[in-house]
Every structure is written in C-alpha cells, then in structure tokens.
Amino acid sequence: MQDRRGCESMKLVRWTLTVAGFLAALLPSAAAAQQLDWQGSIRPRAEAWEEADGETRMFTGMRTRLSLARALSADARLYIEVQDARFWGEALRTTEASADAFDLHQGYFELGHRGVSPLWLRVGRQEMELGEGRLVGAPQWTHQGQSFDGVRGAWTAGSATVVDFFGIQTRESESAALVSDAAFFGVWSRTGLGDDRALELFVLHDRDEGTLSTARTTAGSRYEARAGVVSYRLQAAYQAGEVTALDVGAYMVAARVGAPVLRGRGEVAVSYELYSGDADPNEGETAAFSDLYGKNHPFLGAADLFRDVPGDTNGRGLQDLAMKLGWTVFGEGRLGLDLHRFLTADDEGLSGGTLADEIDLSFRWPVMGGVDLLAGGSWVFLAEAGETLGLAAGDLLFGFVQMSAAF
C-alpha cells in the first residue's frame, strides 16, 4: 500500500513539474510576463418590445469578451480576443457543454504603429472602422459585433496624411460550407487641413463570384470642420459596376451640423441622410445604394428599423431627417434625445413617402470604475408606407437596460 501511495505521489510530483515547466516556457521571465495585457468585459442587456398587436417580447442577451495582447518587440504585437454572444436561457439544458455562440472575434499580428510608423500592418481576423463607420464600421450595439479576415495596413505621409489600405476575404469557396468566393478591398485616406479640418477620400470595391455576381466600386469623400463653436460633417459617395447581375448607379449624401448648448454641457445637432433608391429596377439596372458593412445603429435610430440599406426598403432607398440633443446631467451622467423622420428616396406606387417617425431616449451613468449603466427606449410611429414595405405591423415601443463591466 505504501509503495502504491509512493508511486502516486511521484506521479503527482512529475505532473506538477511538467505543468510548471510548461508555464515557465510560456512565460520565460518576469519581464516577459509584464508584456502580457489581459482585458475582459461582460455586457448583459435586457430588452422589451411591445408591438401593434399587443404582444410583448422580452429577452436578455449578453456578450462576454476576453482578450490577450503580447508585445513581441517595440514594434510587433500579437492580439487574441475570444467572444461569447448569447441569449439567457437559449441552452437546451443547464448541463449543456456546447458553446454555439463562442468564437474567435479577433486574432492578428501587428507590425508598426498606425499614424506614427511610416508603414503599419495588421494581418489576421480584426475589427475595422473607416471614417465614422457609415460604410465600414465596428458596431457596438449588436452583441456579436463585426470582424473581417484579411490584411489591413496604413502608410503615414508626413504629419498630416494617413492612407489606409485593406484586402478582406468575406467568403471562401474552399471551406466546407461555401461554394463561391467573395472579397472586399479598398483605400481610405485622411488628410488634416489645419486646425479642426480634415478631408477623407476613399475607393472601395466588393466582389462576389456567386450565381448572381457582384463587382461594385464605391468612391467618395468625407469632410469635417469646425467654425467657431459650430462643427459640421459632409459625406458623399457614388456606387457603380454590377450588383447581383444588375448594373448599378447609386449615390449617398450625409450632412450634420452641431453646436454646444446649456453653457457647454450639451450639444444639439441636425442631420440629413439620403441613400438613393429605385422602386422599379428594370432593363438590368438599379439605383439602390448599399451601405456595405456600415454600423447603422448610431445613425438610423435606436430601434434598428434599417439594418440593411437598401434591403429593408425593398430597394427604394432611404431619407433620414434627424435632430439630436445630448447633455451632461448629475455630474457624469449623459442624457440623450433623438428625433427621426424616415422617408423613402423613391415613393412611386406608395401612398406618400413617409415610412416612420421615431423618438429615442437614453441615459448613461458611470456607476463605478469600469462599470457603466445604459437605459433607454424608443417610440416608433409607423406610417402607411412603412407598413406596406413590411418594416413592422404597426407602431412599436422598445425599452432596454444594459450594464457594461470591464477590466
């Protein structure tokens, strides 16, 4: 019995030494350990939707993220971020061991420093946001977010210009689940024009080699400036080429003017956005503008009626007239009120072009270090054209409470 216990003890010692050796190899020195940067966050959000038929949908979604950054040298880094996005109670059993919504959200190698090094390069799975994210963005409202597989780089020209370039594989035919290839690539430059002014120029191209092929080019510019206390932004883009075997000629225009109010504790802004549309695409042509991989939630209302332009309007395009107010209250709290009127760009065949009116109210409160509370609601008053296009069955009432905790 003693020999057996002695044997088991030796196995335990050897196992402990093996694990210790593995960890020592992974973290060879205290200095190397200091180069590791761990971050994590948990974000549950409870939502309630009351629809026109009197039905109420209530659910809680949650996103959990854990990331590790490792500096290999002063100019080289590795970054890995895993994510779980789920609804509370979606597992079939409390003992279920699968993690269907668990994924590698980001995983890349980075060389150089964007905007500082002459050349910066990032290779792997990554989030990407260009400009203000209207056409290519990293959405924060959806729990799953958005990430891309590919290469992104930047060239710094002097002290005022940074030119981003990227190549993304959005679909791979060699994978087991897909049968065709799709890719997205482009160039986006930003040049400072002195104090409080900047000009951005971009050319984007997306290709899809599926049955209904796409080869579409989006070119445009974005300008932002400040005149005294007034700030303004202008963006315009044009799309040409082929989309789902149709010739496309479409455009987008967006403008925003903002100014401080309440002795600098708040801001009021008015904005207008136009995505061209085509009620009756014929003879192999369409004028419907696509917002590509943009994040619509900050621009087109908190109720997310328009997650896909032009899909949600059946290709008729979209106009958004909005006024947004935000102000600081109770020291560090932030209160927001947004008013939207949504219209089609082409109302042919509809009883008027108004789709819906929306009121969004939100309040953000920093509870403590690393913990924020966000609560709010939306009231959507659907017009007849909105019902005809199937945006919803009628008026909507939406409310939510979200907690974010991060380290």
Image (cartoon, grey):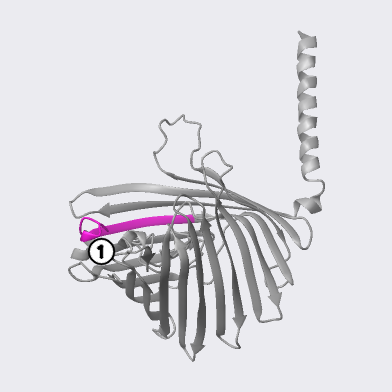
Q: Is residue 31 left or right of residue 312?
A: right
Report x, y in % for residue 97: 51, 31
Q: Residue furthest front?
A: 283
| Residue 391 falls inside the magenta stretch | yes
Q: Residue furthest top?
A: 1
Which image quadrant: the N terminus?
Answer: top right
Q: Is residue 403 left or right of residue 121?
A: left
Q: Is residue 327 above or below residue 137?
A: below
Q: Is residue 10 visible?
A: yes
For residue 247, what is the image quadrant? bottom left
Report x, y in % for residue 286: 37, 66
Q: Which residues are magenta?
A: 388-404
Give me the residue at 51% from left, 85% from top: 225
Q: Amino acid at mark 1?
A: Val
Query: For numbered disc 1, what is the local secondary structure?
Result: strand
For residue 357, what is the image quadrant? bottom left
Q: Is residue 233 above or below residue 126?
A: below
Which image quadrant: the C terminus?
Answer: bottom right
Q: Residue furthest bottom?
A: 228
Give me the residue at 70% from left, 78% from top: 157
| Residue 22 falls inside the magenta stretch | no
Report x, y in % for residue 46: 36, 51
Q: Is residue 383 visible?
A: no
Q: Is residue 62 left or right of residue 155?
A: left
Q: Label 1: which residue?
A: 380
Count the marks.
1
Mark 1 neighbour class, 10 Å CA radius: few under 14, some 14 to 19, many 20 or more: many
Residue sitting nearer the eye, 142 or 265: 142
Residue sitting nearer the eye, 3 or 344: 344
